[in-house]
């Protein structure tokens, strides 16, 4: 009988996570023998629970809120993108039993924007709302696409400046506060805060989005988030939430673990169809 490899996602809360379903679909699609379970893990017990998971033969972990910085500290080795992000969402036990930490969020966003939706980032003017850990993870891959300008806006200006200064060598990145958004326009606006899940939005000028521009919320929900709704109201060519990014970053983690790259489009289509059905039935 073949041994089933064990993987998991750690976080708190975790019951809402779509990651187990996504990885099950990837495993079925690619013929991989693996098990992937959600585990509620608070920050206080993360290190001990992670050590026990790998000691028991676990092959890999995904880590979500509030564990990404702790996973970054836990890893024995870091990829360059994890080092830049100062956060890890993917842990992998290597052949020598050392633990590699990676961050697949940035490439997940990039693939969803450029491949799935055909949004051009080269020479684009990009605005990111918020200056937390999520922003740090997506700035480097966005700058690699050579936008003409990337602006980070945050109520606490010093936090935005700190991220901008860390990545200034990678491209044209600036920081500003919301008061200084007046009379500025952007091709792509990315919401990297969780505020829109609870219906909150920062003060955004009505003409902030260029004609033909796009909006992207890193968060996702069964209903349209407040930011997705704002984008639609402001005639965005695309107003998207982070479900596609979730699937794309999961595919990158799956590839790191299994050496096989799954097809993401059928999984995204299925999850969107289920979401639409749930909304209709609800």
Image (cartoon, rainbow, N blue to C red):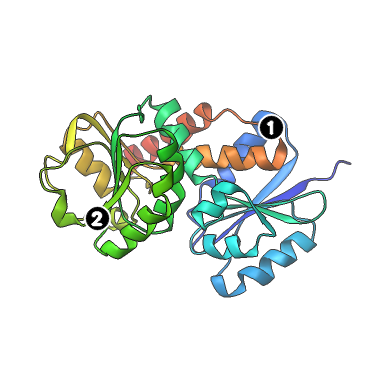
Q: Residue furthest front?
A: 169
Quadrant (top left, top right, bottom left, bottom right) of the C terminus: top left
Label 1: how many Cα within 10 Å (few below 14, some 14–19, many 20+): some
Toward the viewer: 117 or 14?
117
Residue at point 71%, 35% (across, down) = 259
Residue 187, position as x, y percentages in the image: 25, 33
Quadrant (top left, top right, bottom left, bottom right) of the N terminus: top right
Residue 224 visible in the snapshot: no
Residue at point 38%, 36% (across, down) = 277
Measured in 3D between alpha carbons, the distance from the residue under mark 2 to the one under mark 1, in whole angstroms, is 39 Å
Looking at the image, tell me whether mark 2 or mark 1 is earlier in sequence order.
Answer: 2
Task: Identify the residue position indicated by label 1 in the image.
Answer: 260
Say left or right for 225 vs 168: left
Residue 165 numbered tag: none
Residue 245, position as x, y percentages in the image: 45, 40
Task: Identify the residue position indicated by label 2 in the image.
Answer: 199
Q: Quadrant of residue 77?
A: bottom right
Toward the viewer: 176 or 246?
176
Residue at point 54%, 45% (across, down) = 104
Dot 2: element: loop
């Amino acid at each position: 009988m073949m041994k089933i490899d064990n993987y998991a996602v750690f976080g708190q809360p975790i019951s809402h996570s779509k990651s187990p379903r996504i990885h099950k679909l990837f495993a079925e699609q690619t013929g991989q023998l693996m098990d992937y379970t959600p585990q509620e893990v608070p920050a206080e017990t993360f290190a001990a629970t992670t050590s026990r998971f790998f000691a028991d033969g676990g092959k890999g972990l995904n880590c979500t809120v509030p564990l990404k910085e702790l996973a970054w500290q836990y890893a024995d080795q870091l990829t360059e993108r994890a080092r830049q992000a100062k956060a890890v969402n993917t842990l992998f036990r290597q052949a020598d039993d050392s633990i590699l930490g990676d961050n697949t969020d940035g490439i997940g966003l990039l693939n969803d924007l450029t491949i799935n939706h055909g949004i051009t980032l080269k020479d684009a003017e990009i605005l990111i709302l918020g200056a937390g850990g999520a922003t740090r993870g997506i700035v480097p891959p966005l700058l690699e696409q050579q936008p003409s300008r990337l602006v980070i806006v945050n109520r606490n200006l010093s936090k935005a400046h700190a991220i901008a200064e860390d990545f200034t060598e990678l491209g044209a990145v600036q920081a500003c506060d919301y008061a200084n958004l007046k009379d500025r326009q952007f091709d792509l606006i990315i919401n990297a805060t969780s505020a829109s899940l609870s219906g909150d939005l920062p003060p955004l000028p009505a003409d902030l989005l260029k004609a033909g521009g796009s909006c992207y919320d890193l968060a996702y929900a069964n209903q349209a988030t407040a930011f997705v709704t704002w984008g639609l109201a402001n005639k965005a060519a695309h107003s998207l939430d982070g479900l596609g990014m979730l699937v794309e970053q999961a595919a990158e983690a799956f590839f790191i673990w299994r050496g096989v790259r799954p097809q993401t489009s059928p999984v995204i289509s299925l999850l969107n169809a289920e979401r639409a059905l749930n909304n209709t039935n609800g």
